Image (cartoon, grey):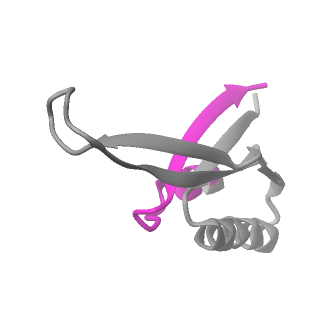
Amino acid sequence: MPFVTKLTFTSGDRRLLDDVVDGVKSAAERKGVELKGPHPRPPTDYRVPQTKRLSADGGRFEPWQYTSYTRTVEIHGHDEFARSVAGDDYPDRIHVEAEIEQV
């Protein structure tokens, strides 16, 4: 039975994320792998409060704000290619999650 591997790439650096996902897409095209995506999700904005002291009565700094970007690709079949892409070494700023579904 064929497997569908869904890879989710997340990063705060949109350019680096797009470069990594484009590299996966071009490698799939070279090897003739059926790849769907990349599917971008809307960016997620985070605000993290920061206190000046560990106690509750201390002042506060401005909140730390950052944006997280997500791209998803699906690899249909081609288990060896999916395994190699999921196990590749990516820059520290890229987070990869793999989800495998048997069809």
Quadrant in which residue 26 is drawn: bottom right
Q: Is residue 63 above or below residue 21?
A: above
Residue 4 counted in the magenta span: no
Q: Position of residue 84 (x, y in %)?
A: 54, 57
Q: Is residue 58 above or below residue 94?
A: above
Q: Position of residue 32 (x, y in %)?
A: 82, 65
Residue 79 shows in the view:
no
Q: Position of residue 91 (x, y in %)?
A: 44, 68
Judged left or right of residue 11, residue 56 is left
Residue at 57 percent of width and 66 percent of height? 13
Q: How many marks?
A: 0
Quadrant in which residue 92 is drawn: bottom left
Residue 97 counted in the magenta span: yes
Q: Position of residue 7 (x, y in %)?
A: 64, 45
Depth order, front residue of 36/4: 36
Residue at 64 percent of width and 66 percent of height? 14
Residue at 66 percent of width and 74 percent of height? 19
Image quadrant where one finds the N terminus: top right
Residue 14 shows in the view:
yes
Judged left or right of residue 53, residue 79 is right
Depth order, front residue of 16/21: 16
Image quadrant where one finds the C terminus: top right
Judged left or right of residue 96, residue 22 is right
Where does the magenta region start and end? 82-103
Residue at 50 percent of width and 52 percent of height? 65
